[in-house]
Amino acid sequence: MKFEYKIEGGDFTHAGYASSQVKKVLKQLNVDPKLIKRVVVCLYEAEVNVVAHACSGTIYIDISTERIKMKLEDKGLGIPDIDLAMKKGYSTASSAVREMGFGAGMGLPNIKNNADEFNLSSVVDQGTVLEIVVYFK
Amino acid sequence: MESKSFHHALKILKDVCIGCSNCMRVCPTEALRVRNGKAVLYDNRCIDCGECFKVCPVNAIIIEQDDFSEIYSYERRVALVPAVLLGQFPTDVSPHAVYTTLIELGFTDVFEVESSAEVLKDFINEYIANSNTPKPVISSFCPAVVRLIQVKFPALVDNIMLLKPPLDLSALYYKQMLVDQGVAESDIGIFYITPCAAKIAAVKSPVGDSYSYVDGVINMDVIYNKVLRVIKQKTGDDITYKKACTINPQNILWSLTNGEANRIKGRSLAVDGLNNAIDFLERLENDEITDVDFLEIRTCDEGCAGGVLNSGNRFLTVERLKNRVNNLLDNKSDIPTESAKCFEKYRPIFKQNISVEPVKPRSMLKLDEDMAMAMKKMERVQRIMRFLPGIDCGSCGAPSCQALAEDIVKGHAAISHCIFMQKMMEQTRKLHPDHSFRIMESIWGKDRFSKGSEKIKKRKKR
C-alpha cells in the first residue's frame, strides 16, 4: 500500500499530520503498538526536519506485510556534512526554531535508533533524501 | 493477549429508543449505529464516557446501577461519597445536613472517597520517582481515560499508572477498619455514589484487578433527589445535624481538574474534556510531547464536577468545593488529625494492595487480526471511500462515510445503505426505488417514514 504526503517548509503547525495518518493506518492493520511507536517517532522527527530545514518536501510511504518504507524527499539547502549531522547534540537550527522546542540536535540520531534501515543522502543546494525502513517481524 | 469481555454500565432500552441518531453522532469512538430504527452499541468500542447518555432526548440510554434496597443486604451500610456530591446542593445545605440525611436514608456510615488521596499522593510520587516506569505516568483515576487508551491508543497502555484509584483505596481502608473493629466482613456493604457511568464499569469489571472492594454502586442523581427531598421536607425543630465526617481539606479537590496534578512532584499536567483528552493522547503517542512526568486526564470538563450523573452545574460545583476547602482551612479545629493518624496505621496494608496488574490493550481500530487480510480490507475501504459522498450525513445509520466503509468491509453493512449510492443506482436502474425504500426502512424503522410528531424530540437537557 502506498501513501503520499506533501510537507511545506516552515509550517510547524501542521508538522505531524503525516505521522498521525500513518499511525491510524498501522493501527487498522493490527501492527504491534510498540512497532507503531517506533515508526511514528521516526516519521515525526523526519517530518519536523523537513519543516525546519527545507523549502518543501514529499513523504512516500510504502507498507507491506513485512515492513514499512518511508522516504522523505526535500528541496532545500541539503546537508554538507552528513557525519556531523548524525552527531548527537549537533544542530543548525536557528534560535527561533529552538524556542519552539525543536532543534536539540537529537532528531537524526533518534530516527536511526528507531529504524531497522536508515539511509541518508544529500546534495548541497538541492535537497536531501532520507529512507527509513521498519520491519514488522 | 487482549481482554475480551467488558461490562458496560450504559444500556440502551430498545423499547424507549426512537432511533434519532443523536447518540451515534456524539460517540467519540464511533461505537453506535442505527439499525431497525434503534441505536445499537458495538461493545468492544464503548468506553463508558456517557456522552450518549447526555444527548438522548427520550432517556432511552440508562446507566445501570444497583437498586437502593440492596444496601439492606448488609448490616453495616457504608456510603462511599465523592466530594462532588456536596457540590450539587445549594450553598445553604451544609455538608453536615447531607451526611446526616444519608444516615437517615439508611446508611450506617458515610466516608469521603477522596480521603485516601492522603496516602495515594505519596505512592504516586514514589511510583514516578522510579526510573523504570515509562513517562509520562498517566493517572488511573478516570476509568473512561483508561478505557479510551485501551481501545484507541494501545501504544500508551504501559504509561497508565498501576496504582489503585482513591475509590478502591477508600473502600479497602474502610472495610479493613471495620473488620479491625470486630465487624464481620460479610456484614459490610460498601456502596459508591457515582457521578458517572465509567466508575460503575470500573467497579463491575475492573481493569488490571480481579475484583473490586466496592459491593454496589448507586447513581448520584438518585441520591441527590432522595437527600434533597428529605432536607426540603424538614421543618423547624427536627433539624439537628450531627457533625459530618471530616476530611483533610487538601484532598477535597482531588477529583477536579488539577486536583491531582497539583499534588504531584515533577512536571505534571492536567487535561480535561473528552476531545482535549483525545487530542493530547494523539500528540503524546506521536512523541510530540516529551519530558512530562505525570498526566492527570479526565474525560469530563472540570473533572468529576462535570460527571454525567451530576444534577448541579459543574462551575458552581467547583466553586462550592473550593469554598468548603477554604472554610475548613479557616476553621482549623475541623481538620481531622485523627483520620490522618488512622491512615498512617494502615499504610502497610495500602502498600500491600495498592498495585494493579498491567493494563492490556483492546484495540478497536484493527480491520482484521491478520495483517495481510487487514491490508486487503483497507484497500477496499479506500475504494469504497471514492464512491461515498464524504458529507458524513449519517443517513446510512453509521456516524461517518469512513465508518460505513469500514462496516461494509467487516460485513456489517452494504454500500446500498448510502443514500447517495441509492440515487446513483436508481438512475442507472441497478436498484428499484421500492428496494431502496425498504433499505432505508430497515435502517431507520418504518415509523420514521410515517406522519407524526413523536419522532421529533428536542434535546432534554440544558
Image: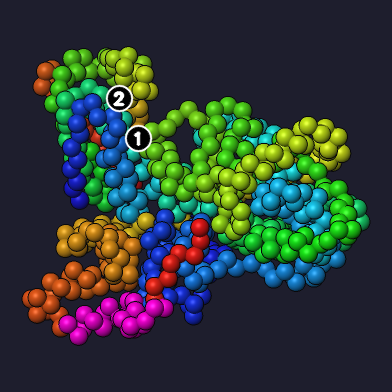
Instruction: Pick whichever, A29 or B296, lies toward us.
Output: B296
Query: Residue B133: where, in percent of width, then height?
Result: 56, 35
Task: Say whether residue B175 is magenta.
Answer: no
Farthest residue toward the right? B182
Residue type marked 2: Leu
Farthest residue toward the left? B428
Q: Which residue is mark 2?
A: A108
Q: Are marks 2 and 1 in contact (CB under 8 Å)?
A: no
Query: Residue B379: where, in percent of width, then height?
Result: 21, 58
Q: Secondary structure at mark 2?
A: helix
Task: Say whether residue B450 is magenta.
Answer: yes
Q: Which residue is mark 1?
A: A41
Choose the circle earlier in sequence order: 2 or 1. Answer: 1
Q: Are marks 2 and 1 on the same chain?
A: yes
The span picked out in magenta is B433-454
Residue type marked 1: Val
Residue at figure coordinates x 39%, y 34% from the top left: B287
Query: Residue B244: where, in percent of width, then height?
Result: 83, 48
Q: Is residue B456 above or below residue A10?
A: below
Q: Chain of mark 1?
A: A
Query: Residue B58: where, in percent of width, then height?
Result: 49, 71
